[in-house]
Image (cartoon, rainbow, N blue to C red):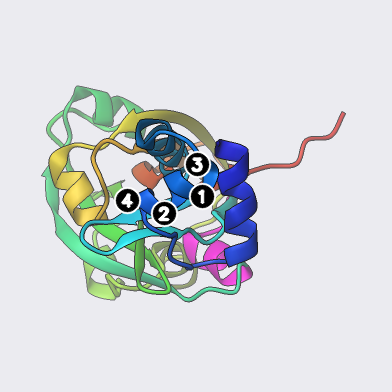
Amino acid sequence: MKMSLLQLMDELGEDALLPSERELAANYGVARSTLRSAIGELVMEGRLRSARGRGTYVAPPKLMQPVSLGSYTEAVRSMGLTPGRRVVTLEHHVAQPDLADRLRIRTGDLTVHLERVLLADDEPIGLESTYLPLDRFPTLLEVLRPEGSLYLCLQKDLGVVFAEMDETVETVLAAPREALLLETNPALPMLLVMRTSYDPEGVPIERVRALFRGDRMGFATRLRA
């Protein structure tokens, strides 16, 4: 059933509306429960989108972001899309032990916390929280344009050089608040990225927690032997 649906999706094209469940079940001679199971798998894989009250649509291809030191802005533009950000939180945040350890500061020290919804052509793709030591970047809030590129601001306005990073990626489910901000179903898998970036002296610059919609985003890298 799944292969039949994939063939139909190729014929219909991106953003096309699938026929109703009743029509599909009759056309393929299968039970509606079998059809729903196949559609559910394709929704989980990000190949179909379900819109309550409107039906099921063929999803556009996933956005593939390179695993690199480049910014989100550069990655989205390289895909031919327009990047954007919606500010959720901009505040001073007290560092707890784990964050303090990652940034090599003292527990209780203040950080700059910037939380934003990441957009691609105005579609919510990810939710990113970034923490930077306030002592190191005391003027950040004065020069930062919250809807713009943080990396560009750090590099151009504050002279920061990014040299390397530690990054992990795993699959998780979004919390209700996160799913609401990302305008997605909390049952769909997410990609959780945890990153610490360093300058050429090995001093931590930032700690980032980014949650990306698994149905809309993937990560790619090139390895050499």
Is 99 one of the magenta-colored residues? Answer: no
For marks 3 and 2, give the CA distance. 56 Å
| Circle 1: residue type | Asn
Q: Tell me where the magenta segment starts and ends, as one range.
A: 66-78
For marks 3 and 4, give the CA distance. 18 Å
Measuring from the top left, give residue 46's x and y in whole percent.
47, 47
Mark 4 vs mark 1: in front: 1
For marks 4 and 1, give the CA distance. 44 Å
Disc sitting over residue 27 in the figure: 1
Earlier in the chain: of badge 3 and badge 2, it is 2
Discs 4, 1 touching: Cβ within 8 Å: no
Q: SS at mark 1?
A: helix
| Residue situated in front as seen by the camera: 186 or 68 | 186
Crowding near the residue tagged with mark 1, few <14, some 14–19, many ≥20 C-alpha atoms within 10 Å: few
Residue at which label 3 appears: 198
| Circle 4: residue type | Glu
| Residue situated in front as seen by the camera: 188 or 202 | 188
| Circle 3: residue type | Tyr
Measuring from the top left, give residue 134's x and y in whole percent.
23, 50
Q: Quadrant of residue 196?
A: top left
Residue at which label 2 appears: 23
Q: SS at mark 3?
A: strand
Discs 3, 2 touching: Cβ within 8 Å: no
The C terminus - image quarter: top right
Mark 3 vs mark 4: in front: 4
Q: SS at mark 2?
A: helix
